[in-house]
Image: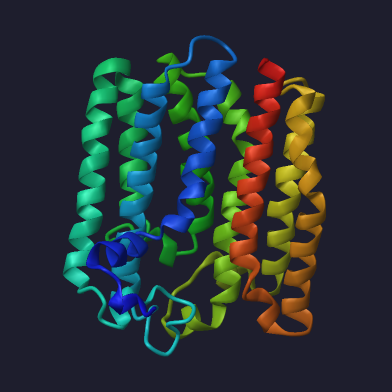
Amino acid sequence: MSIVSLPRWQVWFLAFRPWSFTASFIPVTLGSILAWQQGPFNLFLYLLALAGGVLLHAGTNAVNTYYDYLAGIDTVANKGKSQPFLVLGWLQPRELLWGGHLAFGLAIIIGCYLIALRGWLVLALGIIGLVGGYGYTARPLAYKYQGLGIPFVFILMGPLMVVGGYVVQTGSFGWLPVLASLPVGFLVAGILHANDLRDIEGDRDAAIKTLSHYLKDAAQDFYYFLIWGAYLSLALLAILKVLPWAALLPLLTLPEGFKLMRMVKGGFTDNPAFLEPVEPLTARLHLIFGLLLIIGLLLAGL
C-alpha cells in the first residue's frame, strides 16, 4: 500500500517518525528506574514524563523535517535517504511546521503540571529541552548545520532526559542519573553520527556542515569512540560501584557493536553502501543496550 493511500492521520503519525521514539523512551525510563531504586515510584508521573519527552521528540522531528526541506537537504533526488513527506507533497510545509508546534504545545501543558508538582528543576530542564529541540534546525540557532548536533543531542537525549525522569519522581537533582546517562548518551549520539556519515555527500551539496564534515577521515574513528564510549563508561561505572554489577547486562551487545564498527570501516575503505544500514542498526543497539541496562537495574533493585 502506498503511503499516500493511507488515512491522513496515519500519514501524520509517520511524519513524526515514531520509530525514533525509543531514543526518548530509554533515557526517561532509565531515570525513573534509578529513582525507583531510591524510593517510591509513581506510575502516573512516569507516564507523564514519558509523554512529555516523546512530544518534545516528535516536535523536534517535525521542525527538523521542515527546515531540512527549506535548506535543500531533503529533495526528490535523495528521498530514499531523507524524510519524503514534504518533497513528495504528502504534507504541506506549513502544516507540518504547525504540527510540530502542536507537539511542543502539548509537551508544555504536561510540563506546566509537572512544574506545579516538582518546581523549578522541571522548569529549567523543560526550557533547555524545548529550546534545544526547536533550535536543532530552526534559526537563529540551527546548531545542527554548524556541526554541533552530536554534542547537543548527547546532552539533550542523554543526561537531560535521564535527569528529567529522575527529578519527576524524586523532586530533587542527583549526580547518579547524570553518570548513569553517559552510556546511552554515547549511543544516541552514535545514531546521529551514523546518519551524518551516510549523508556526507548530500549535506555537502546543501552547504550543511555536520561534525562529519569537519572531522573528514577521522569521522569513522569518532564513530568507534562513541560505541566504545558506551561500553567503557558502563564498565567504569560498575567498577566504581556507581551502578550495580547487574547493570553490566548490556555487555551482551558487544558483538553487535563490533559488527557496526566493521560496517563503518567497510563504508570508508571499500563500499559507501555499507554505511546505509548503520543508522537504524545503531538505533537498535541503543534500544537493546538501554533495555538491558534497565532490566539489570530492576534485577538489582529487586
Q: Could you tell me how many numbered marks the image carries?
A: 0
Q: In the image, residue 273 lies at what x, y percent?
A: 67, 82
Residue at image position (72%, 46%) is 229
Residue at image position (54%, 83%) is 201
Q: Dividing the image into 4 quarters, which one contains the N terminus?
A: bottom left
Q: Dividing the image into 4 quarters, which one contains the C terminus?
A: top right
- Horizontally, residue 264 falls left or right of residue 47, namely right
- Horizontally, residue 159 falls left or right of residue 266, namely left
Q: In the image, residue 9 lies at what x, y percent?
A: 25, 62
- Horizontally, residue 94 falls left or right of residue 62, namely left
Identify whether 178 is placed above or below 256: above
Quarter occupied by residue 71: bottom left
Residue at image position (68%, 53%) is 226
Q: Looking at this rendering, what residue extends furthest in the bottom direction?
A: 77
Residue 236 in sight from this viewpoint: yes
Identify whether 182 is placed above or below 61: above
